[in-house]
Each structure stands twice: as structure tokens, then as C-alpha cells.
Amino acid sequence: MPVVTIEWLEGRAPEQKAQLAHALTQAFVKTAGVQPEQVWIVFRDVKRSDWAMGGHLLEHPKPASSV
Amino acid sequence: MPVVTIEWLEGRAPEQKAQLAHALTQAFVKTAGVQPEQVWIVFRDVKRSDWAMGGHLLEHPKPASSV
Amino acid sequence: MPVVTIEWLEGRAPEQKAQLAHALTQAFVKTAGVQPEQVWIVFRDVKRSDWAMGGHLLEHPKPASSV
Amino acid sequence: MPVVTIEWLEGRAPEQKAQLAHALTQAFVKTAGVQPEQVWIVFRDVKRSDWAMGGHLLEHPKPASSV
Amino acid sequence: MPVVTIEWLEGRAPEQKAQLAHALTQAFVKTAGVQPEQVWIVFRDVKRSDWAMGGHLLEHPKPASSV
Amino acid sequence: MPVVTIEWLEGRAPEQKAQLAHALTQAFVKTAGVQPEQVWIVFRDVKRSDWAMGGHLLEHPKPASSV
């Protein structure tokens, strides 16, 4: 029943997501008594040019006219 | 006023989304008295490699070193 | 598999949500071939004082010092 | 950097959320090399009368006129 | 058309939300050429006991048996 | 601490997102007393074929068999 959403920067390897999905699910099973198949996990990879902190995009593509 | 978000696995045809958008909007109009143009629907297609159930990604790309 | 989220203003009767949940699920079954039990719907009621349009909260509680 | 959202049914004890927050964060640290303080977790408790599966709210309050 | 969601800790005064809704909307109008009435803003107040950083809930209610 | 999500139609230039990220962050600093580095902003660009209003997708690709 938990729907778990992970919003983070893109660039993670599929193996890493697989391991994390397993570990997160186990955390729900052990600490919250949830059945594994009830845990739905969705990864949302965000581009660095779509994430801002401190008022600045993490990656700021140069404008086309900047040369 | 309702913002309706549909998070599901990618792969649906545009015609199917169009039919569904129409049917969902009608459901709001008929059962909740909402004006059609007030219903905003956003589809979020999720890759099978970004969705996990039971601790496993629905699609687990083989690691580069698996050959 | 679809996770459907409905974000709207609070104040709807439970019966209305029940009818809508049924109608939305039927829309998925008929137009997208989804099994009913695969459709998860979450209603998120938002207070009028937490929703803004055109730069104004839909309900703006008077400041304590406004008398 | 990961923002982790957990949407589930209300009714969990605060201690259980605390244990889960710890376990989930550890999962990110161990499998994804994330610093603990970079993991933000938000629990969203959903009422049973706001969650539907199979076309039915998990809890359907009787209409006022049902007696 | 932008749907702007603000997820933060509860406790802000309504006047502060009103000012912020106005300022955020102006930012869209000035930098993105959006009409004010097209900007929908939703505030989601989160309890300190539902938000974790560094593996710890920001407010951890003592367990009932802790005395 | 605020996590700000902007869901809108794709097609905005990176410079526009950069300016908006700056302006939105300033709005939080000035009206809510938040430190700039505490403001996390995530842009979610949505395709016109994934957004519906009034029951119609904003862009409806013709079905393959429509000729």
C-alpha cells in the first residue's frame, strides 16, 4: 500500500536502483510489517538543468547567443 | 479545479490516453458537477526500469559486466 | 498499476468520492483494459486557504490585526 | 538530494515512522552512497475514506440518510 | 498552466502564504510571460513528525512507554 | 525546506527556467524568511500529448490508421 516516490538527480545505474528498491522494500517489511508485494516504488530522475538550489539551476546551459 | 495525475507504466498509445482523458473528465462532470474545462489531467509515463514491486524493478537491465 | 491522484478543494461528500472512484475506475477498465483492482485512487483535499489562483488564495483569512 | 515521499494509509505510530525513516535513510547511504543529511523523507498519511482500490473507497462512510 | 506545489513545514501564517502566493505568481508573470490566472499554487503543510532529515524525524513524539 | 515543484508544458528555454528559479527563490527569501539554499525547486516538463483540459489532450497525435 505504500507508494514510495524517489525524486533525485538522474545518472544512477540501473543496478543501483535495483539494489535500492530491494533495500527500501526490506525496510518496510522489517519496520512496518508490510508485505513486499504491497510496496510500490517509483524513481523519478530529474535532470540537473531542472533542479535548482539556492536560486540556481544545478546545471545552467549556456544561452545560444553566449559566444 | 481538480488536478488529476495518472502515474503508470509507459507504452500506452496516444489514442488510448485521449479516450481515457475524455472518459475521466466525463466522470467528473457527471458525478461531481465539475465543468469539463476545469479538469486538468496529467499523464506521467514511468519506465519499467523505474518502477519496483515486491522489491524488484519490473525491468532490470543486465549489468554491463554480465556477459 | 495506475496510481491516480486527485487534488481538489475540500468539501466533497464521501458519497460523491465513492461514486467518482467507481466511475474513474470504470473509465480505466473500459478504455485502457486495466483490471479494477489495479487502479489505486488517492483523493487529496486542499483547503481554500492553501490554494491560490491569479496570485490570490481562494480564501484569505483576515489578519489578526485587521479590525 | 533524494526527496522520498511515502504515501500510505494513516494509523502508523510515530515510533514506526521514526524507525522507518532511519532504515530508509540507511538504505540510501549503503546502496547509493548518499550522505544521510541529504535524504529528505516526507510521510503523507491518507485516510481510508480517501483511498480507493477496485473502484471502492477502503472506508465508505454511510450517507447521512441511510438509517 | 503551471501547477506549483509547495511542500514545507506547517506553521506559516495565512498572511505569509498570501504574500508568497502573490510574489510567486508575479515571478511567473515577469520571467515566463504567464497570465496570473493561469498560475495554480497549492501549499502542502507537513507536520514536523512527518518530515525526516538525516534519518531522524524533525519531531519525534516520545513513545507512550518512555516515562 | 520548501520543496517547490513546477509542473507545466515543456518548451521553456533553460535561461527562462534559470531566471524563474532565481525569482521564485527570492520570493521565499523576502516573504517567508527562508534561506536561499533551503529552497529546492524541481521543474517537471510535461508533453502536450500528456496534458488534457476539457477532456482533450492539448496535442492529439493522429492515429496511425487515420489517412
Image: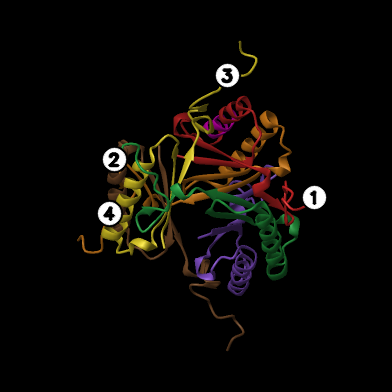
Chain colours: A brown, B orange, C red, D yellow, E green, F purple
Q: In this view, does B57 lie above or below A58?
A: above
Q: What stretch is highlighted in magenta?
A: C23-30
The C terminus of chain D lies in quadrant: top right
Distance of label 1 from label 4 (alpha carbons)? 59 Å
Distance of label 2 from label 1 (alpha carbons)? 54 Å
Residue F20 shown left or right of residue B50 in the figure: right
Q: Which mark is residue A29?
A: 2
Question: Are the residues flagged by discs 3 and 1 from a single subunit?
Answer: no
Label 4 is placed on what type of residue? Answer: Gln
Distance of label 3 from label 1 (alpha carbons)? 42 Å
**Mark 2 or mark 4: whose residue is earlier in sequence:** 4
Quadrant in the rendering for residue F55: top right
Q: Residue at x 32, y 51 (%)?
A: D22
Distance of label 3 from label 2 (alpha carbons)? 33 Å
Q: Dot 3 corresponds to which residue?
A: D62
User: Dot 1, crowdedness within 10 Å: few (<14), some or many (≥20)?
Assistant: few
Q: Dot 1 corresponds to which residue?
A: C67
The answer to the question of whether label 3 and label 1 lie on touching residues, with beta carbons closer than 8 A, is: no
